[in-house]
Amino acid sequence: LRFPGRFRRLLGNWIRRRQGPDRGAVTLSRGRIYILPTRLGVAFGLMLVAMLLGSLNYANNMGIGLTFLLASLGLVAMHACHRNLETLIARGAGSEPPFAGKEAVFRVALANPGGAARCEIETSAGISPGSPVTVAAGSESTVSLHVPTQRRGTIILDSIEIATRFPYGLFRAWAVLHPSLRCLVYPQPAADALPPPRAPGIAGGGATRRGEDDFSGLKDYHAGDPPRRIAWKAFARSDELLIKEFSGDAEATPVFDLADAPGSDLESRLSVLARWIIDAHARGATFGLRLPGVDLPPEPGDAQRRRCLAALAQFQAPEPDVF
Amino acid sequence: MSSERQENWRHLAWAMGGLVASLGPHLLRLKPWVSGFVLAICAWRLLAERRAWRLPGTFLRGIIALGVTIAVFFSYSTITGLDGGTALLALMSALKLLETRTVRDHTVLIFIGWFLCLAAFLYAQDITTTAWVMAAVWLLAAALLEVSHQGQSGPRLRPFRTTGAMLLKAAPIAFVLFFFFPRLAGNFWGAPSAERALSGLTEEMSPGDISDLTLNDQIAFRVRFAGNPPPPALRYWRGPVLSEFDGYTWARGDAQSFFRPLVEHLGTPVDYTVTLEPTGQQMLFALDMVESWTPGLARQSWDFSLRTRNPVHGVLRYEARSHSRYRAGPELAASLGNLSLQLPNGRNPRTMEFARSLRASVANDAAYVQAVLDLFHDQDFYYTLTPPGLERDSVDDFLFNTRQGFCGHYASAFTMLMRAAGIPARVVAGYQGGDWNPIGGYLIVRQSHAHAWSEIWLADAGWKRVDPTAVIAPERIERGIEASFQGSELLPGGLMRDSPFWWQAGMIWDNVNARWNDWAVQFDRGKQEEMLLSLGFEDPDWRDFGLVLGAGLALGIGLLFFWLAWEFRPRRGDPAAQTYGRFVARLERRGIERATGEAPRDFAARIRRLRPDLGVTALAITETYLRLRYLPEPSAGDLNLLRGLVARFRP
């Protein structure tokens, strides 16, 4: 049954009050599974009433038997529907931070410790239903919940509904989780940002770039360093992987500073920074980030991109959106 | 085909399969055009789905719906009632088929299917119908499972099997409900309308009616005797008494009398229970002469026949007590006397003339009766299953012309001869004899045992049965109709009579049917009380019924609960995995969760970073666990070690 919005809200509040917040893995115990007939279930019930009245009137014993068999089947379906959720273990299994405006993906792992498959488990966050999955006996399935985002910061997924209408769709059993799953939302990268300043952050810095020719020394190789700078000759001599350093690097390595980013307000400047970071990462360059109170020294790689974007997401972040 | 179309096709095929199965019992009963139309639409719809044809629009469907409704009205002259209603339901299900696109449409089809199952039971409740309907119910439920299943993900659904398991779980609860749900006495919306033509004995008898019935092997009723059954010659099952004669046909007539002649019952009584198959009429059958019967069920009219208030449309069970020796109506009221002497003016003149002269030639009524019987015996009268047709003055034609007749002809002629001579007489229709079923210990009376005899009133003796057939074919009365016509191809069930094996099989099957009638079809308030009595309730009232029903349901649902719990019970993993699981669970309670797919060693490293104090123990547990899991021959010592480590592990 679909309830009118107001009633749904009241029901939701009531469930939240009686269950309290959830932490970690949640076992769907009997106390937190709700079950009601669906529209089809109500129609089925009405059909049974009509059949029973007809059979009783005609004193038709086989008709009465048929009605009772179907009624019992409905009862079994109700229990089976409830069982289909019971003892299922749900927990948050990470999330994928999106850029603002895109959908955040929360992953929920459903583990079935029981010896029978759980068929057609629909997991949904708020309004967007997930496609039903079947969790085989003794195994685990992960479902992705897509939550739309509007602005950067953090979104919290605090209401997950795990429901099933299996078998027959006569009943719908559901459980509500309040796991407070968090996911960062990166600023939306600016579409057409100016390239970052050449020598960022150094007052009066020379405009000329000395380039890569000015060899200034060797340093230890770290994963992610560009292979073409490996000092192969040195390697042949000493079996040590070394990287050639050039004097131009210090100036050329961009540390993107909020102060350098053009834009009318904080959000648009953060967007520009996001664009610079993405582009720099895509080039395989080394980059850093400087925000008031945040100083991420230059480094290349995926982890750096994540760190930088996370710093942007969290910088003077607005109140998280709760779903 | 796209996956969506494939799913649609699957849903349609399942729903249609269920629908056709539920139509099964109706297909032969419905008028041919209805069955044909429904099957044609089914075939067309399947083709349309395969070839992706357009389905008819709302307007066309409306026209067809109106058309078939009118057609049903003209064909059945009603659109309500059982026949008309069933035809309409079948046609509407076919029309619904023309617009099936969504899950909801398919669901409606399945619901219609269940109603058709119920309608099938309104026609017949025998074992075969029940078995068929149960299969259809199963198929329909499986179709509902398939239709309501949206996802293509996961392992392949097995609707038939899954539903079978569900029905098996539902069965105990259904049985409790069936046996203990209180039955009402009587109908609350009035009796269902009588419109079915049932073959069998009626309250009219024209020449040839009874001999036609001998070809009918259907069961009229079954009788279980409390003691020994009476000998075959005394098994006269009295049905309608026919007092009105128009020269050709005998009929019950509308004569009413509040005065029922006195009956003196003599000798030892016979107690028995009759399970009557539906007749669509009000008559009941009882051994001559009935003394008492299930109270409130029927009234005995002035001619000693039993009549119910409403036509018998279902199987009816009643008890009765009869005496084979009796003196009925020593005094004859004038009005009844006249009624039993009435003859149509100017009909059968030769018989009238013959009766008068024969009566004049003998001394008294008793001698006249004997003279008539002697006439049948001595002259060339024949007892035959295939008597020739008779003229309008049927008795004249029979006595002086054809002289070949079945019991009805003799009863008719004899009664007429009595009346013409001033002896009150009437024709009694009913059954004579029956097949003894030694397996079940009861008597089977079939339509082929239909019989007609006479009853005459003589001063002092009262109403006496005279069976002219006993004179012309005594073996018919002593040993049954098969004895009279040995080897005749005309009688039904030849194979069964001739082969002992098939005879035995037939009797066993009939016994099963009789029990089915007793315990399923005829399960009523009385049987319910019997059951409660056997459960130890004395004088059960509604509270006891509630108690038993509640306890039974609790038992059934408890059974279901444990059944499901057993099905869903956690599978025990290997002991090492279980112990490791406990370790993970303890960490989880402290907020350290193992991520999906995180390898145990990675997890241990993470624990060490997060809680350096637990690092060593976590590593030891992890390494022991991995040894147990992956070494070809894990040692029992390791398992004990792991258990000890985890037991002492208190994060």
Image (cartoon, coloured by chain):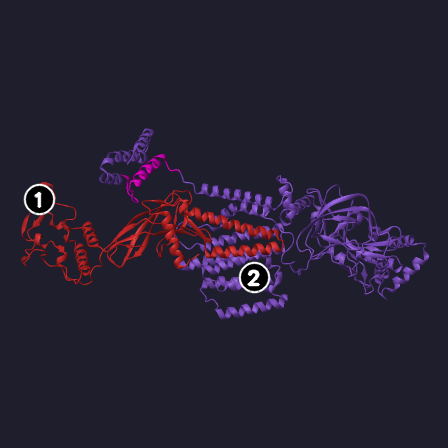
Indicate whether A84 appears above or below B335. Answer: above
Depth check: give the residue in front, B208 or A159: A159
* Other residues around mark 2 within 10 Å, as few (<14) / some (14–19) / many (≥20): many
Is residue A250 visible to the viewer in this orientation of the structure? yes
Depth check: give the residue in front, B86 or A101: A101
Q: Which mark is residue A214?
A: none
Task: Give me the chain letter of mark 1.
Answer: A
Q: Which residue is mark 1?
A: A234
Q: Is residue B366 left or right of residue B548?
A: right
* Front of the two marks 2 and 1: 2
Quarter of the image where one finds residue A102: bottom left
| Span of residues in magenta | B572-600
In the rendered picture, chain A carries what hue?
red
Q: CA distance from mark 2 to mark 1?
A: 91 Å
Q: Position of residue B417 (x, y in %)?
A: 87, 58
Marks 2 & 1, CB-CB < 8 Å contact? no
In the rendered picture, chain B carries what hue?
purple
Q: Amino acid at mark 2?
A: Ala
Q: Which mark is residue B90?
A: 2
**Quadrant including the C terminus of chain B:** top left
Q: Is residue B219 magenta?
A: no
Depth check: give the residue in front, B391 or B87: B87
**Quadrant including the N terminus of chain B:** bottom left
Q: Position of residue A196 (x, y in %)?
A: 13, 59
Q: Amino acid at mark 1?
A: Ala
Task: Give me the chain letter of mark 2.
Answer: B
Callout 2: SS: helix
Q: Position of residue A9 (x, y in %)?
A: 37, 56
Q: Residue at x 49, y 46 (%)?
A: B165
Callout 1: SS: helix
Q: Is residue B112 left or right of residue B351?
A: left
